[in-house]
Amino acid sequence: MASRSINSIGAIALSSFMTACASAGGVPRPFPVPDRPDVVPVPPTPDAPERSRHAAVVDTALGLLGVRYRSGGADLAGFDCSGFTQYVFWQHGIPLPREVRDQFRVGEAIRQDDLARGDLVFFRTTGRRPSHVAIALDGTSFVHAPASEGVVRVERLDSAYWSRRVAGARRIVHGDDTADGDGHR
């Protein structure tokens, strides 16, 4: 009986450790750590009298720098990757699905060369399907909620770790238009 309880506790602990990005299929390893050179300082946000939704989304995301990672998290107590993107976009009245795989189906597919502020960038950190999502700051950097040892932070797309794992990008915000849940404007 004690052996069964220990096995159950071990399975629960392993299960919660292995979740990442709301059912992405496992903890992406090895995520870069904050003191590595591929973690970049936050670029300044230009002041403009009429701010676009792109800038507003990015400002909201950057305002969450330092919030800790929490598996299954989608609020200020902590975020996983898709909880972070869902929360940020929701602050601007733009609904996103909860899971990475569903967010990957929303909006308009774009080439990595066409990345702009506020686009979603997807990565394959476990397996062949997208398992991690971030918000592009421009064509070279992004903000995201990494794995359990991390906090919301900015990193470079051209880093050795991330550049090999880009799975695609989606444009959710089109000027003042948004994509609906089926990817239509």
Image: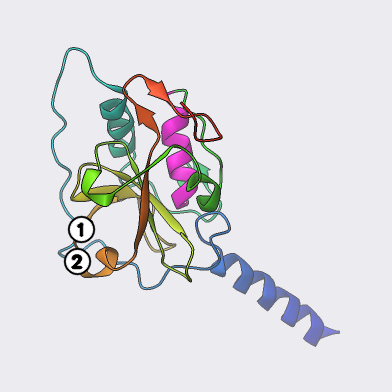
Residue 182 in view, yes or no = yes
Front residue (pair 49, 41): 49
Q: Are marks 1 and 2 in contact (CB under 8 Å)?
A: yes
Front residue (pair 39, 69): 39
> Where does residue 102 sit, x and y in percent of width and height?
55, 47
What residue do we see at 33% from left, 40% from top? 119
What residue do we see at 23% from left, 43% from top? 114
Residue that numbered label 2 is attached to: 36
* Residue interval drawn in magenta: 80-92
Q: Is residue 115 above or below residue 17?
A: above
Front residue (pair 108, 151): 108
| Residue type marked 2 | Arg
State the residue lying farthest toward the right: 1
Q: Secondary structure at mark 2?
A: loop
**Disc marking residue 5:** none
Residue 76 in view, yes or no = no
In the picture, measured across the screen, residue 53 lies left or right of residue 95, that is: left
Q: Quadrant of the N terminus?
A: bottom right
| Residue type marked 1 | Val
**Disc marking residue 39:** 1
In the picture, measured across the screen, residue 60 lies left or right of residue 179, that is: left
What residue do we see at 25% from left, 28% from top? 55
Q: Is residue 102 above or below residue 94?
A: below
In the picture, measured across the screen, residue 105 lies left or right of residue 158, that is: right
> Where does residue 173 sit, x and y in percent of width and height?
37, 29
Q: Is residue 173 above or below residue 128?
A: above
> Where does residue 59 sit, x and y in percent of width and height?
27, 31
In the picture, measured across the screen, residue 72 lies left or right of residue 150, that is: right
Main structural element of the magenta stretch: helix, strand or loop? helix
Report the Cα–Cα distance between label 1 and label 2.
6 Å
> Where does residue 134 sit, x and y in percent of width and height?
36, 49
